[in-house]
Image (spheres, rainbow, N blue to C red):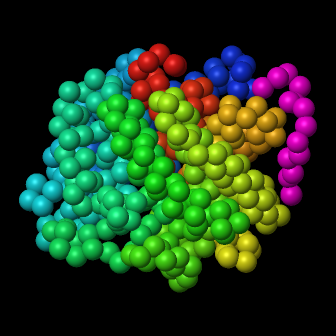
Amino acid sequence: MMEITAGATPPGGSWLQRGSHRDWLEAEGQRLLAFYRASRHPECGFAALDDDGRLPDDARPDTMITARMTHCYALATLRGVPGAAPLVAHGVAALQGALQDSEYDGWYSELPREGEAPSKQAYIHAFVALAAASAWQSGNADAKGLLDDVLKVIEARFWSEDEGGMREGFSRDWSEGEAYRGGNSNMHSTEAFLQLADVLDNPLWRQRALSIAEKLIHRHARANDYRIVEHFDSDWHEWRDYNSDRPKDQFRPYGATPGHAFEWARLLVHLEAGLLRHGESAPGWLLEDARGLFQRATELGWCVDGEPGLLYTHDWDNNPLVHERLHWPVAEAASAAAALHARTGDSTHERWYRCFWDYIERFMIDRERGSWWQELDHHNRPSNQLWSGKPDLYHAFQATLLPRLPLAPTMARAIAEGAL
């Protein structure tokens, strides 16, 4: 098991301050952007690529992928990457077109087949909001209408002022609500809300992000020894055995997910920075809980099963459960380490940052066929138990940007202001 101990900054100074490391991150980000241009679906939006970066003949436009691609290429547009703006326009058109429910409002998870009545999920709407905000910030005029539309749906259907968080899911016509509240959807809503606060210059969204963080992290994760509780009933009672028969669920797995602890640690640091930047009160627990989450995630997730890497989940007795190594948790771990190092100057986070990127370079990055492997098995060999192909640009690309950006404002606003 690999251990990181406190000590002086490693020789050569911080990677995070070195131009050569920043150049490496830039080159990797550009490589990822080039690979995922092929995910543009000819019908509308974007769809999942296979391992070789090809769009399968039966690929279907997917709303989550479309929103994430739109967000990423909007950031690329802001950075001056030629060819990115037309991809943003393609994504916005799909989110305002076939992927949007013109009869009942809201967004489908994917392009529906005839006769289907897909549900409406908070997770999807959080990413539509993120995409709309980034696209509008990047100069896409049509994105303002998309942003107005998704905010109306979030306000009317998903956000609960009484609960201080997001409701989870509804039937297509909104007549039936899901008796479940999810940590994953609320976490990504927090991410979207922080960006909305910056892009719209509206502190309401930052206060809503704080409300979610207080509920999920300061109230529940802290009381559970900084293990993220992901599943709740409609009254926000912890639902520990939810999906115990589906431990490898892609979005709602049983047990605790160290990758989400890293992601939350980063978001808490960004939230604190956003509050302070605008002269708003930032509770001290934001940094304290971010540190607690990061430390616990490394203890329970990193190299705990005899092999390098970050496992997907562990059970409530802290035993490894799903050993597969997905790409997004280690991407988030690197970003969280960078954020905590920027906030605290603690060299321990610098050491973790190097450790995570060394692992990514050794095991995750596919230099032969492009992008990153989305999943590795227990022995760090390519696997497809949870995910097949290479559908996701979002986590890896953000990991190449976040270490080079300030903690506040959020990415689209920071890049628009010339931070990168």
Left or right position of 258 against 319: left
Q: Nearer the viewer, residue 17 or 167?
A: 167
Q: Which residues are magenta?
A: 1-14
Left or right position of 395 against 153: right
User: Which residue is at a point 34% across and 36% down the rendered structure image?
Assistant: 202
Left or right position of 135 against 383: left
Say above or below: 27 vs 108.
Answer: above
Write down the quadrant of residue 131 in the picture.
Answer: top left
Image coordinates of residue 21 in percent, x first then y, are: 69, 23
Q: Main secondary structure of the magenta part?
A: loop
Q: Nearer the viewer, residue 369 or 341?
A: 341
Write down the quadrant of residue 153 in the picture.
Answer: bottom left
Q: Where, quadrant-wise, is the N terminus in this rendering?
A: bottom right
User: Which residue is at a point 82% across and 23% down the rendered structure image?
Assistant: 13
Image coordinates of residue 2 in percent, x first then y, are: 86, 52
Say above or below: 234 vs 2.
Answer: below
Q: Is residue 7 magenta?
A: yes
User: Which residue is at a point 55% across and 45% down the rendered structure image?
Assistant: 267
Image coordinates of residue 353 in percent, x first then y, are: 73, 39
Say above or below: 146 vs 154.
Answer: above
Image coordinates of residue 357 in percent, x first then y, are: 71, 39
Q: Is residue 98 magenta?
A: no
User: Which residue is at a point 47% across and 25% down the rendered structure image?
Assistant: 414
Q: Can residue 376 be seen?
A: no
